[in-house]
């Protein structure tokens, strides 16, 4: 975790000792490192140097305005999947001309908002959506730029819930139907073919599926160009994995270099849609040990963060490293089940963790920057955590802790 490290037994991010955050803002709290975020973005962007490209951050990974704004300032584009994400990107100062809109269920109102904003491209996922978009654009007197998201039927070899590029998945247009649909898109009056798109899954730790996909896409690109279509960009999706524990994913540089060498000197601009690899290891979830609860069978550490704050362990059995913010003597370590206060057995952050703990200790759940806060909920009427951005020795609050009043704000009781 490049921006998080121990000094004299204390866990730091940049020039901030993490205890300071808990003291000032309480727990649970998500803490991100601006340096880590910047480094991650620049690694992708620099690897593309000398080639026409656009890094479109997948907003779903973490849609905090503070994060979107920092990426926008670095020149990033954005991959959105809803009208809500569109509004966030615009509010954060993102350039509409650098937005691509993905997702299988775009609604007419969302299409309209995106057309009004003047986004770069709609990644269309079905024939019905293509016709819907053509109609909405027609009503507005506009022409919608489109890519078809094709499903290359490549096994991403990742968790089945986050694998999207197999023919049995709901995503994309079946590979063999793509050419015919492109031909019919060309005949529509209010869409304009701009690109070709794919995305095969998330948390990929090998290059091979990306390379195989890229080759398939180039084959399709050749056939489309032979039909006389002008494809301006090739969107290769997101999915590069990060290290949570033992994984050894390719670096952003290795990944981009691999894509570049397959694509060669084709004239198309290359787009990618990384989410996790930009923010995942730039963030941690800070939580306090509320109680230690030894039982005859297992020792529990009950912490103040729960599955509603970080759903990944409960949902995917995902592994997140859990580190003490102030290290204690290893000799006192025991094997703990690190669990939250939510009333479900699935509410855990980590099983069988070797830790030396006392009540009141602060823990950092690592690699929590992606799909942490963005997937959080209010289950058990738990207000959502605060979020802070560390920048050098400064701590900026980028989202206040939610209040119970906010949770109930839209609710009414019967007269
Ligand atoms: N583009 C599209 C069309 C996507 O569907 C996704 C992620 C991305 C880009 C970004 O993928 P990334 O670079 O982050 O792997 N909640 C799950 C991950 C779901 C990913 C959904 N799509 C998790 O916590 O692991």
Image (tube, rainbow, N blue to C red):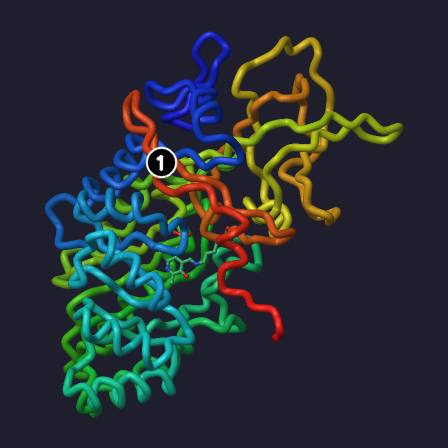
Q: Position of residue 156 (x, y in %)?
A: 48, 56
Q: Work out which residue is located at the far right of the displayed protein and give it.
A: 296
Disc 1: CA contacts within 10 A as few (<14), some (14-19) or many (>=20): some
How many marks the image carries: the answer is 1
Q: Kindly identify the residue that appears in the image at 26 percent across and 45 percent down.
A: 257
The answer to whether residue 198 is left or right of residue 161 is left
Which quadrant would residue 113 be assigned to in this image?
bottom left
Q: Residue 85's spot in the image, x, y percent?
A: 34, 61
Q: Answer with the quadrant where ligand 1 appears in the image.
A: bottom left
Residue at image location 46% in from the left, 42% down from the top: 401
Residue at mark 1: 397
Whether residue 147 is visible here, answered yes or no, is yes
Residue in the foreground of this view, choosing between 105 and 125: 105
What residue is at 18 percent from the left and 62 percent from the top? 96
For residue 69, above or below residue 238: above
User: Left or right: 319 with respect to 62?
Assistant: right
Question: Observer-nearest residue: 286 or 346?
Answer: 286
Question: Would you place residue 44 above or below residue 389 in this image?
Answer: below
Q: From the image, which quarter does the C terminus lie in?
A: bottom right
When asked about the image quadrant of residue 17, the answer is: top left
């Amino acid at each position: 975790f490049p921006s998080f490290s121990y000094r004299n037994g204390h866990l730091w991010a940049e020039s901030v000792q993490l205890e300071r955050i808990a003291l000032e803002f309480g727990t649970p709290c998500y803490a991100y490192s601006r340096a880590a975020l910047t480094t991650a973005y620049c690694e992708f962007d620099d690897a593309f140097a000398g080639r026409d490209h656009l890094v479109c951050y997948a907003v779903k990974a973490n849609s905090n305005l503070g994060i979107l704004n920092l990426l926008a300032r670095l020149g990033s584009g954005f991959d959105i999947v809803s009208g809500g994400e569109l509004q966030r990107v615009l509010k954060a100062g993102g350039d509409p001309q650098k937005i691509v809109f993905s997702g299988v269920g775009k609604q007419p109102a969302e299409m309209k908002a995106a057309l009004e904003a003047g986004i770069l491209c709609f990644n269309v996922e079905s024939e019905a959506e293509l016709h819907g978009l053509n109609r909405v654009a027609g009503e507005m007197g506009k022409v919608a730029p489109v890519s078809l998201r094709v499903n290359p039927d490549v096994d991403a070899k990742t968790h089945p819930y986050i694998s999207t590029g197999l023919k049995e998945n709901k995503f994309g247009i079946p590979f063999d139907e793509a050419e015919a649909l492109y031909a019919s898109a060309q005949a529509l009056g209010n869409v304009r073919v701009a690109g070709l798109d794919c995305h095969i899954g998330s948390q990929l730790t090998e290059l091979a599926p990306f390379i195989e996909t890229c080759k398939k896409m180039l084959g399709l690109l050749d056939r489309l160009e032979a039909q006389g279509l002008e494809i301006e960009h090739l969107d290769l999706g997101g999915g590069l994995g990060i290290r949570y524990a033992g994984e050894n994913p390719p670096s952003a540089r290795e990944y981009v270099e691999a894509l570049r060498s397959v694509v060669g000197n084709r004239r198309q601009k290359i787009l990618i849609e990384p989410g996790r690899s930009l923010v995942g290891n730039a963030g941690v979830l800070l939580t306090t040990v509320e109680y230690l609860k030894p039982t005859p069978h297992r020792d529990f550490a009950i912490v103040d963060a729960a599955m509603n704050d970080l759903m990944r362990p409960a949902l995917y059995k995902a592994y997140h490293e859990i580190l003490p913010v102030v290290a204690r003597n290893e000799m006192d370590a025991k094997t703990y089940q690190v669990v939250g206060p939510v009333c479900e057995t699935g509410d855990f952050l980590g099983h069988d963790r070797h830790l030396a703990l006392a009540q009141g200790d602060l823990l950092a759940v690592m690699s929590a920057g992606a799909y942490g806060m963005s997937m959080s909920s209010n289950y058990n009427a738990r207000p959502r955590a605060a979020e802070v951005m560390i920048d050098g020795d400064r701590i900026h609050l980028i989202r206040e802790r939610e209040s119970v009043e906010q949770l109930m704000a839209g609710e009414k009781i019967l007269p």
